[in-house]
């Protein structure tokens, strides 16, 4: 099964487009999809402060591709989050943070559902050795024990910078029990020689092999998750919003 979806819901004067994958699939019971709560694609102008605000039971991966944000939080962490530095906030029972963006920023804030409710809040960072992973999948965050950015739920996130005309397969995983979501952050790709996706579009796929060809220089984010694994769907932002 391959289902194409478009990121359409807009907030904040259209500066943030929100993808609720379950809602896009016309689910009547859950706005999320398994462990994926929602994906926010942000285009925010410079000199913007998002004041201190709470998160509850959300695991939030900040994936910024242009610009940067100065992060401050209730756990005492301060850091510059950018194209070269990723951040995973595991809000747990409750967590507050603030962001200041001195210059225009484009990126994703990815809301993943935690395995259990009311875990201990935790913040972790990952410095990327290379800004882009050219024509090769890069694992950004996972539940694996050696992962620098570690999810508690069964969720894996990859990215790739795929150059024009290049082709690639998806990483190997157990297609009998895993679900994938492929998101086009920039550019345009052709899937299995017949399905075109452009910036802001995505697909959900189950039990499928994918051949991806870049029809222009493209940046892709890939989510692999076990929909049936244990997760908490009552998070403040990652939870079911119906």
Image (cartoon, helix red, strand yellow):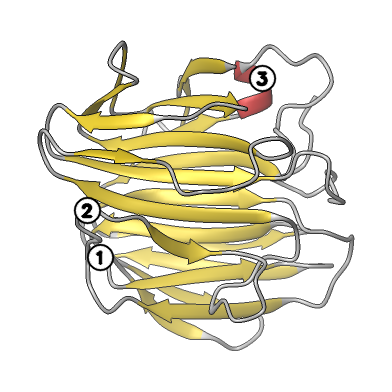
C-beta proximity under 8 Å, tags 2 and 3: no
Instruction: Locate residue 68 relative to residue 90 in the image: left or right.
Output: left
Instruction: Locate residue 80 relative to residue 34 in the image: left or right.
Output: left
Q: Is the residue marked by circle 1 packed among few (<14), some (14-19), or many (20+) residues within 10 Å?
A: some
Residue ID for mark 2: 104
Instruction: Locate residue 130 relative to residue 158 in the image: left or right.
Output: left
Q: Secondary structure at mark 1?
A: loop
Mark 2 vs 3, N-terminal side: 3
Q: CA distance from mark 1 to mark 3?
A: 33 Å
Q: Position of residue 12 (x, y in %)?
A: 44, 35
Q: Is residue 49 visible?
A: no
Q: Which mark is residue 23?
A: 3
- Identify which residue, 62 or 36, lies in the foreground: 36
Question: Which residue occupies 22% across, 53% down?
Answer: 104
Quarter of image, res 38? top right
Q: CA distance from mark 2 to mark 1?
A: 7 Å
């Amino acid at each position: 099964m391959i289902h194409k979806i478009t990121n359409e819901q807009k907030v904040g004067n259209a500066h943030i487009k929100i993808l609720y994958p379950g809602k896009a699939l016309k689910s009547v019971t859950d706005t999320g999809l398994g462990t994926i709560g929602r994906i926010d694609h942000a285009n925010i102008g410079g000199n913007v402060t998002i004041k201190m605000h709470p998160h509850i039971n959300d695991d939030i991966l900040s994936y910024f591709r242009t610009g940067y944000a100065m992060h401050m939080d209730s756990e005492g962490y301060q850091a510059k989050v950018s194209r070269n530095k990723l951040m995973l906030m595991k809000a747990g029972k409750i967590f507050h943070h603030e962001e200041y963006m001195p210059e225009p920023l484009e990126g994703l804030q990815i809301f993943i559902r935690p395995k259990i409710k009311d875990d201990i809040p935790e913040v972790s960072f990952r410095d990327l050795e290379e800004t882009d992973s050219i024509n090769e999948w890069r694992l950004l965050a996972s539940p694996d024990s050696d992962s620098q950015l570690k999810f508690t739920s069964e969720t894996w996130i990859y990215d790739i910078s795929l150059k024009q005309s290049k082709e690639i397969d998806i990483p190997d995983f157990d297609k009998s029990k895993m679900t994938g979501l492929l998101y086009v952050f920039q550019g345009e790709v052709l899937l299995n020689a017949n399905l075109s996706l452009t910036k802001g579009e995505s697909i959900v796929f189950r039990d499928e092999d994918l051949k991806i060809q870049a029809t222009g220089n493209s940046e892709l984010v890939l989510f692999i998750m076990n929909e049936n694994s244990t997760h908490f769907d009552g998070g403040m932002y990652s939870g079911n919003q119906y």
